Image (cartoon, rainbow, N blue to C red):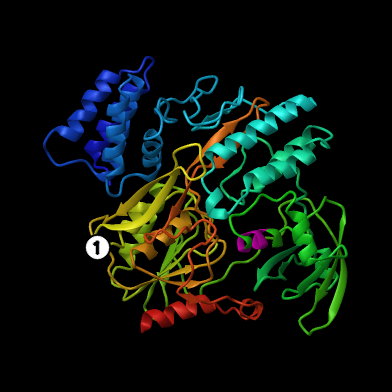
């Protein structure tokens, strides 16, 4: 954690680097004093920032080789800040001349040149940060569409990191989409084609950044969730038309508008954003099975709790719809913004991390939870349904007693599909004390992104037994942005992360040590078999 003195010093550095013009000489002197004054080095967070800033200054002033040396130093810092280390990784392959928090644009977004190994595709380029002032053009000609299609395919070919990992035949994909390109009738059809082209990557972290494909989102006053791959009603709004039609919680959805569930899920692929694993896509598609335009009717067939069948006409309503209820823990929780905690009746500590969509505040909330549960004989960490956010090395460090290899990053470093740079990521103890008791980590198929990373790091360190079902497998890591001549901006993953044994988490996910999949009867009876198994394992 940064000391007050370090925060003051870093603020002075940032002030020098955000002036117009930048005072790189003052910033360099401040940074060199921090890292070379012979006294105790700054915290890992501060040190990683300092090294990257020094490399950035060298790149700004033409000292490319020295810049690379500073970036290498940053990547060697145990427990460095993940966000700034991503910049350091980028700096090993090309100059870093723009950092968002130091070069926030006043008007047009600065353009970073394409990597030296990227193909030449006219006005299209690759940038670390997406421009915020461009919008997709309208009234594109057939020639325009061809130019932008070719540029996107080529830049994905050069920058995407996971072709070999996922066995994607990218030239074959191009042939299929070229046949469809000639039949495109207008702008929206063209952008839908590009959307589906990006979906071929099956990558949750690759998407159209400034264009939203139209997708009906209005649903009846019921909520659907999947249990063992089958969709069930989990909530019905009291007094709604669905309630009046006799739709009950626990009924299984068999068909929608005369389409089977499998047919409906397959049709949704045309407009739903891709997921990194099929299990995660099925869960996401399950939430959209009843979606359509407000005012229309969904004709559904259900299997009731007594085994009979029921048909119902459910009118779709505008608005957010009914929220599926979560699993309720049978004991009191102290609730915070992101991290909630309490004690299981067995005496075990329980910490539920609802989301990682925050930075220092999440780590601080976890610190408070851990302090309250310091004497617990075992700890249950619940990250089920946690979709991710930002990496949390400080939280992981509170559970480690020594520095350990926790993940391996693979970053695109050349034009060929196999050109990947490999970097080992280490974490060590954080905070004034570390929890040393046994830990059970609860996961499911929604656990993804930063939550997948959290599970990967703790599993790699051997600190947890995982209970539940395999995680999303959504850990492609860092990304770059392709900007096309038509103004479309596309995020493309240019890396992926593996565990300490170099097994990719992207696609594969973090598998549980104890597989426990709740069923609909568990839900109806208020049972949480995942939590129950974790308690039994820890009490052994």
Vertical relation: 344 (above or below) 218: below
In this view, the residue in front, 230 or 112, is: 112
- Residue at the (34%, 51%) spot, across then down: 425
- Residue at the (31%, 32%) spot, across then down: 68
Vertical relation: 29 (above or below) 42: above
Q: Is residue 336 visible?
A: no
- Residue at the (30%, 72%) spot, across then down: 437
Point out the stretch of residues depicted in magenta.
Answer: 279-284
Q: Which residue is mark 1?
A: 401
Dominant SS type (magenta): helix
Residue 445 located left or right of residue 510: right
Q: Secondary structure at mark 1?
A: loop
Residue 139's spot in the image, x, y percent? 79, 25
Q: Please state the total of marks drawn on the protein image.
A: 1
Q: Quadrant of residue 380?
A: bottom left
Residue 229's spot in the image, x, y percent? 67, 70
Residue 222's spot in the image, x, y percent? 75, 64
Residue 453 located left or right of residue 486: left
Residue 477's spot in the image, x, y percent? 47, 48
- Residue at the (70%, 51%) spot, across then down: 272
Are there few (<14), some (14-19), or many (20+) residues within 10 Å of tag 1? some
Residue 275 located left or right of residue 285: left
Q: Quadrant of residue 186?
A: top right
């Amino acid at each position: 954690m940064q000391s007050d003195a370090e925060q003051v010093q870093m603020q002075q550095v940032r002030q020098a680097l955000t002036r117009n013009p930048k005072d790189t000489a003052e910033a360099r002197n401040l940074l060199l004093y921090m890292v070379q004054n012979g006294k105790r080095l700054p915290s890992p967070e501060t040190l990683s920032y300092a090294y990257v800033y020094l490399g950035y200054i060298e790149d700004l002033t033409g000292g490319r080789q020295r810049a690379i040396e500073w970036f290498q130093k940053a990547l060697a810092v145990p427990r460095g800040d993940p966000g700034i280390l991503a910049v350091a990784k980028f700096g090993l392959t090309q100059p870093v001349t723009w950092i968002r928090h130091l070069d926030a644009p006043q008007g047009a977004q600065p353009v970073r040149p394409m990597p030296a190994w990227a193909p030449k595709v006219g006005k299209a380029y690759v940038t670390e940060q997406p421009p915020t002032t461009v919008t997709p053009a309208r009234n594109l000609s057939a020639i325009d569409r061809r130019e932008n299609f070719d540029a996107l395919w080529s830049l994905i070919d050069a920058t995407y990191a996971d072709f070999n990992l996922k066995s994607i035949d990218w030239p074959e994909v191009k042939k299929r989409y070229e046949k469809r390109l000639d039949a495109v009738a207008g702008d929206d059809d063209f952008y839908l084609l590009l959307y589906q082209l990006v979906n071929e990557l099956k990558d949750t972290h690759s998407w159209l950044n400034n264009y939203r494909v139209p997708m009906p989102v209005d649903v009846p006053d019921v909520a659907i969730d999947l249990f063992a791959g089958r969709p069930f009603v989990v909530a019905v709004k009291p007094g709604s038309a669905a309630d009046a039609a006799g739709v009950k919680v626990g009924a299984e959805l068999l068909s929608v508008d005369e389409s089977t569930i499998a047919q409906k899920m397959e049709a949704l692929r045309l407009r739903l954003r891709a997921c990194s694993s099929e299990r995660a896509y099925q869960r996401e598609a399950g939430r959209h099975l009843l979606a359509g335009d407000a005012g229309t009717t969904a004709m559904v067939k259900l299997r009731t709790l007594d085994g009979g069948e029921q048909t119902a006409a459910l009118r779709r309503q505008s608005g957010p719809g009914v929220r599926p209820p979560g699993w309720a823990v049978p004991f009191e929780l102290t609730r915070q913004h992101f991290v909630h905690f309490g004690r299981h009746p067995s005496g075990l500590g329980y910490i539920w991390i609802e989301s990682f969509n925050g930075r220092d505040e999440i780590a601080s909330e976890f610190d408070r939870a851990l302090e309250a549960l310091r004497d617990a004989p075992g700890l249950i960490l619940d990250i089920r349904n946690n979709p991710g956010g930002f990496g949390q090395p400080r939280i992981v460090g509170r559970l480690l007693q020594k520095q350990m290899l926790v993940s391996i990053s693979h970053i695109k470093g050349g034009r060929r599909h196999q050109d990947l740079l490999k970097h080992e990521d280490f974490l060590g103890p954080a905070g004034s004390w570390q929890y040393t008791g046994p830990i059970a980590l609860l996961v499911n198929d929604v656990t993804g992104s930063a939550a997948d990373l959290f599970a990967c790091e703790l599993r790699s360190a051997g600190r947890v037994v995982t209970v539940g079902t395999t995680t999303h497998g959504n850990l492609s890591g860092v990304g770059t942005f392709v900007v096309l001549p038509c103004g479309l901006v596309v995020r493309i993953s240019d890396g992926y992360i593996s565990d300490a044994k170099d097994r990719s988490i992207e696609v594969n996910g973090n598998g549980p040590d104890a597989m426990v999949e709740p069923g609909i009867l568990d839900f109806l009876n208020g049972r949480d078999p995942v939590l129950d198994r974790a308690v039994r394992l820890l009490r052994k």
